[in-house]
Amino acid sequence: MTKKTLFFNCFLAILCFSCKNDAASSLITFDKLLVNTKQNPIAIENKQPDFSWIVGTDGYNKSQSAYQILVASTEENLNESDADIWNSNKVKSDKSAFVK
């Protein structure tokens, strides 16, 4: 599978976000999912890409405390047990820009 095909079919998922307040009563949105500052890139030119996203929440005093990035060759493989390209596992961090 070529890089172009692989990343064309790749879907970036950012999971495992939690908020300082009750997450069940809060809507969390993820906007502008980017790889090397591009949305849905056809190809990735370096071996260690930068992932970025914008977290939006309802209410006040809520922020990201962790992330998990999954990369898979198909949308069907995009889950923790089947991510066939890469799984960052849960990373405790509030960082959401230029994550290597």
Image (spheres, grey):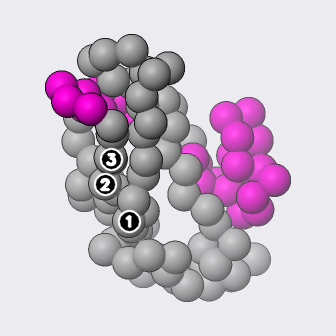
Q: Does residue 96 appear to the left or right of 85 in the view shown? A: left
- How far is the residue under mark 2 from the one under mark 3? 4 Å
Give the residue type that dot 1 points to: Lys
Residue at x 25%, y 58% (from the top left corner): 98
Asked if disc 2 and disc 3 are in contact, CB closer than 8 Å, the reply is: yes
Residue nearer the viewer, 83 or 54: 54
Q: Which mark is residue 55?
A: 3
SS at circle 1: strand
As drawn, 47 above or below 87: below
Q: Residue 54 carries which label?
A: 2
Tell me, yes or no, whether the highlighted magenta stretch contains residue 74: yes
Residue at x 33%, y 39% (from the top left corner): 57
In the picture of the structure, the residue carrying the numbered disc 1 is 32
Residue 43 point in image, percent of width and height: 52, 82
Is residue 61 visible in the rendered structure shown here? Answer: yes
Tell me, yes or no, whether the highlighted magenta stretch contains residue 47: no
Q: Place residue 67 in its image quadrant.
A: top left
